[in-house]
Amino acid sequence: MDNNIIAAIKKRRSIRRYTGQDIPDNTIEQVLEAGRWAPSGLNNQPWRFIIIKDTATIHGLAELTSYGSIIEGCRTCIAVFYHAPSGYNRDRDLMAVGACIQNMLLAAESLGLGAVWLGEILNRADEACALLGTDPGYELCAVIPLGFPGESPEKDRKPLSSLVIKNF
Amino acid sequence: MDNNIIAAIKKRRSIRRYTGQDIPDNTIEQVLEAGRWAPSGLNNQPWRFIIIKDTATIHGLAELTSYGSIIEGCRTCIAVFYHAPSGYNRDRDLMAVGACIQNMLLAAESLGLGAVWLGEILNRADEACALLGTDPGYELCAVIPLGFPGESPEKDRKPLSSLVIKNF
C-alpha cells in the first residue's frame, strides 16, 4: 500500500474545468510556497511567478492559446518564468523549473484545487510576455490555471517495464 | 499549518551521505512508480530510467563527476534519460523530466531514503552514456544516487516576495 505522498503523486490529474468559486489568497500562497521549495542546480532557484486574478488579463492570456477555454474558466492563473540571469545551465535550469511546477501541482491538489500545466501558450510567449509586461530575461515556461475542480478525469501512463531501459 | 503533502515538499532535502544499508528492490520500484506518474505535454512521458546497483558501474559513473564521492557512497543509482523520439518539444519535455525527477525525490524521502539530483555529470554525458551502453536518442538528464540517509542537512530558499514579480 502506498504512503500518502506516493498516493498523492499517483492520484493527481490535470483538471481543465473549474467551479466558479474564488480561491482564497492564502491558498494561492501555499501553492507558490510549495514551488519555492523545489531543488535546483547550485540552489539557484531560477523560477519566478506572476499571479493573475484580473479578468481582463486572464481573457488576454486565453486569446493566445487554443486551450483558451480552460484559462477563461479558471479563477486564478500562475504564470511561471525562467529567470535566465539567475540560472547556470539552461537545460538543467528548465528541469528545475519543471520540479517547481510539479510541486505546485501536487500542492494544489492537496489543497482541494484543480490545476493543469499549459505549455501550448509558449508558442506565443512573446505576446504573453508583452501582455504581462515582463522585463527581458524572464522566459515564460508555463501557465497554470487554478480553480476548484469541476471534473474528475482519468488518465493512464505507460507501464514501468517500458520505461526502465536497463538494469546494472 | 501545512497539510502532509506540502509539509513533505518543504521538508525534503538533498542527501549526499548514506549508510551502507541496501535498498529493497520494492522500494526502488516505488520510487520509479512515482516518477512514472508525472505530467507531460501530450502525456508523452518522455522519461526513461536505468537502475544501477552494480558496484563497478557505480564506480565508473563516479569517475565522471567531481561529485563522485556521493555516487560512490550510494547503494543504488537511477540514471534518468530524455527519450527524444518520444518527445514533442525539447524545452517542455525537459521540464516534464524535471517533474518526473521531483516526484522520485519526494517519493524517496517519503520512503525514508535520501537522494540528490546530480547534474554536473552531464558535462561528461557522452562518456556516461557509453558506460551505460545507451542507444542514440536517449539523452542523460540526471543521475540520482539513493541510500538510507547518513546526514540531515539544512538548506534555505529565497523568500516568496522575491519570486513573485507581478500581480494582476
Image: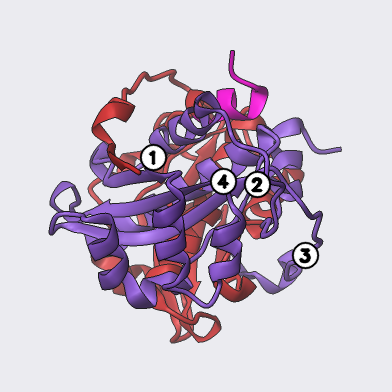
Chain colours: A purple, B red
- Tell me if mark 2 has few (under 14), some (14-19) or many (20+) residues whose alpha carbon lies within 10 angstroms of its own: many
Which disc is residue B31 wearing? 2
Q: At x 71% / y 54%, what residue is drawn?
A: A13
Q: In whole angstroms, how far apart are the C-alphas of marks 2 and 3? A: 20 Å
- Residue lying farthest right? A1
Amino acid at the residue labelled 1: Pro
Report x, y in % for residue A155: 77, 65
Q: In whole angstroms, how far apart are the C-alphas of marks 4 and 2? A: 34 Å
Badges 3 and 4, same chain: yes
Which disc is residue A155 wearing? 3
Query: What residue is disc 1 on?
Result: A39
Circle 2 SS class:
helix
Circle 4 SS class:
loop
Chain where mark 2 sits: B
Q: Nearer the viewer, mark 2 or mark 3?
A: 3
Residue span colored magenta: B1-9
**Looking at the rendering, in which quadrant would you find the C terminus of chain A?**
bottom right
Report x, y in % for residue B29: 71, 51
- Tell me if mark 3 has few (under 14), some (14-19) or many (20+) residues whose alpha carbon lies within 10 angstroms of its own: few
Amino acid at the residue labelled 3: Lys
Query: What residue is disc 4 on?
Result: A75
B106 falls in the magenta region: no
